[in-house]
Image (cartoon, grey):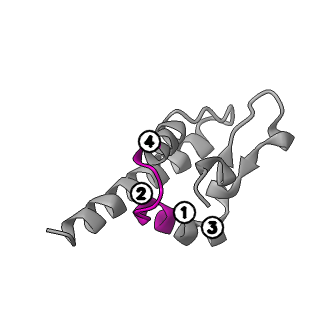
Amino acid sequence: MYDWQYFFNHDRSNLNQGTYRIFEPEWKADILHWFTQKDVDKQQKKDFIQALIDCDDGCGDFYRYRAYFLAAEALSQQFISLRSRI
């Protein structure tokens, strides 16, 4: 699975059509693991991080903060995987 939209495909105009696995606890480990994969294009990872940071939930920022914290954790995981190669 290379496309980050499998985990998060936000459709603000029709929330029922979106994909929001990023808010399901059972997907967190898979998402963080996805970020450490060497065969996933760096641009895909950057686009996913940007989508998480730019998440506009329309729910008083509850989900926005959760997405933002997931982005921060993903970035820290990438740093850890880079550090292990040094």
Of 62 and 57, the residue lying toward us = 57
Lower position in the chain sequence, tag 4 or tag 3: 3
Secondary structure found at label 4: helix
Q: CA distance from mark 3 to mark 1?
A: 6 Å
Q: CA distance from mark 1 to mark 4?
A: 16 Å
Magenta segment boundaries in residue numbering: 32-43
The circle on residue 27 is: 3
Determine which residue is flagged by label 1: 31
Secondary structure found at label 3: helix
The circle on residue 43 is: 4
Lower position in the chain sequence, tag 1 or tag 4: 1
For the residues bearing labels 1 and 2, Cβ distance under 8 angstroms: yes
Of 22 and 7, the residue lying toward us = 7
Camera-nearest label, 1 or 4: 4
**Residue 2 appears at what percent x and percent y?**
58, 56
Lower position in the chain sequence, tag 1 or tag 2: 1
Give the residue type that dot 1 points to.
Ile
Whether 30 is drawn above or below 5: the answer is below
How dense is the environment of label 4, judged by Cα within 10 Å: few (below 14), some, or many (20 and up)? Answer: few
